[in-house]
Image (cartoon, rainbow, N blue to C red):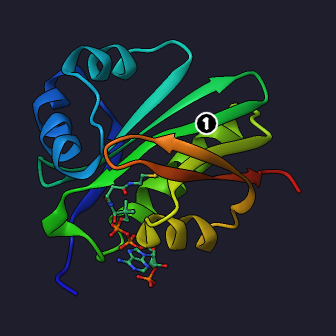
Amino acid sequence: MAKMMLAIRRGTEADLADISAIEREAICPPWSDGTLLRSIYSESGECFVADESGWVVGFAFVSVSEFEAELLQIAVDSTERRRGVGAELLQWTLRSLRQRGVRSVFLEARKSNAAALALYCRFGFCEVGVRRGYYDAPAEDAVVMRLELFS
Ligand SMILES: CC(C)(COP(=O)(O)OP(=O)(O)OC[C@H]1O[C@@H](n2cnc3c(N)ncnc32)[C@H](O)[C@@H]1OP(=O)(O)O)[C@@H](O)C(=O)NCCC(=O)NCCS
C-alpha cells in the first residue's frame, strides 16, 4: 500500500466539485449539486471529507435526529479504494456521532453492494431488515443495517 497523508475534515462549499465528481461515478442515482450543497451545510447533519494532500478522495454524509443517525452516503474515488480511506471516514463519522450522543446509526445499501456491506459489517453494523424494490435504475432491494454505539 502506498503511504498516504490522509486527513478527515468537515466538508465545505469549496469541496462541492470534488464531492460531486466522486458521487456521480459512485452513487446510483446521484444527488444533484443543490442537494449536496444543502447537505454540506445541513444543521441536522454532517459532511466529512477525506483529504489527501489537498485532494478530496472520499466523503460521508450523515443526518442526525437526537439519538438516531442515518449514514446517507459514503463514497471513495474509484482510483483510491482498498487503501483504508472508507474505513477512516466511517471511523471518524462514528466517533463524531458518539460525541453528539447518538445511540443508533442506520443505513441502507444495495443488496449487491458487497464492498459497502463488508465495510459496514467490519464496523459492527447488523442487518435489521430488507426494503423490497427500494432502489431504481437498476431496481434492487435495500438491506437495512443498524449499529448501536453504546452497547
Ligand atoms: C464502499 C466504499 C466506500 C469502501 O471504501 P474503501 O476506501 O475502498 O474501503 P477500505 O479500503 O477502507 O476498506 C475497509 C473494509 O471494507 C471492506 N471492503 C472494502 N472494499 C471491499 C471490496 N471491494 N470487497 C470486499 N470487501 C471490501 C473490507 O472489509 C475492508 O477491509 P480490508 O481492506 O481490511 O479487507 C467504496 O467501495 C465505494 O466508494 N463504493 C462506491 C460507493 C458506495 O457503494 N457507497 C456505499 C453506498 S451504501
Question: Would residue 119 appear left or right of 54 to someone viewing this image?
Answer: right
**Would you place residue 139 above or below residue 11 in this image?**
below
Q: Outermost residue toward the right?
A: 151
Q: Quadrant of the C terminus?
A: bottom right
> Foreground residue, 135 or 22?
135
Q: Amino acid at mark 1?
A: Glu
The quarter of the image that holds ligand 1 is bottom left
- On the image, the x and y values in percent for residue 139 come to 41, 48
Left/right of residue 82 with respect to residue 110 in the rendered view: left
Q: Quadrant of residue 97?
A: top right
Q: Residue at x 21, y 64 (%)?
A: 5
Residue at 43% from the left image edge and 65% from the top image edge? 113
Q: In the rendered picture of this protein, how many numbered marks are placed on residues? A: 1
Instruction: Choose top left, top right, bottom left or bottom right for residue 76.
Output: bottom left
Image location of residue 81, percent across then percent down:
25, 70
Beta carbon at label 1 within 8 Å of ligand 1: no
In the image: residue 5, left or right of residue 139: left
Asked if 115 appears above or below 142 in the picture, the reply is below
Residue 38 in percent (x, y) is at: 34, 13
> Secondary structure beneath disc 1?
strand
Left or right, residue 137 beside residue 77:
right
Name the residue nearer the viewer: 66 or 116.
Answer: 116
Q: Above or below — where is 29 with respect to 139?
A: above
Specify few, some or many for label 1: CA neighbours under 10 Å numbering under 14, 14-19, or 20 or more: some
Residue displayed at 19% across by 79% down: 3
Q: Residue at x 54, y 44 (%)?
A: 133
In the rendered view of the protein, which quadrant contains the N terminus? bottom left
Residue farthest bottom in this picture: 1
Horizontal and vertical percent for residue 73?
42, 42
Front residue of this view, candidates 30 and 6 = 30
Q: Which residue is mark 1?
A: 70
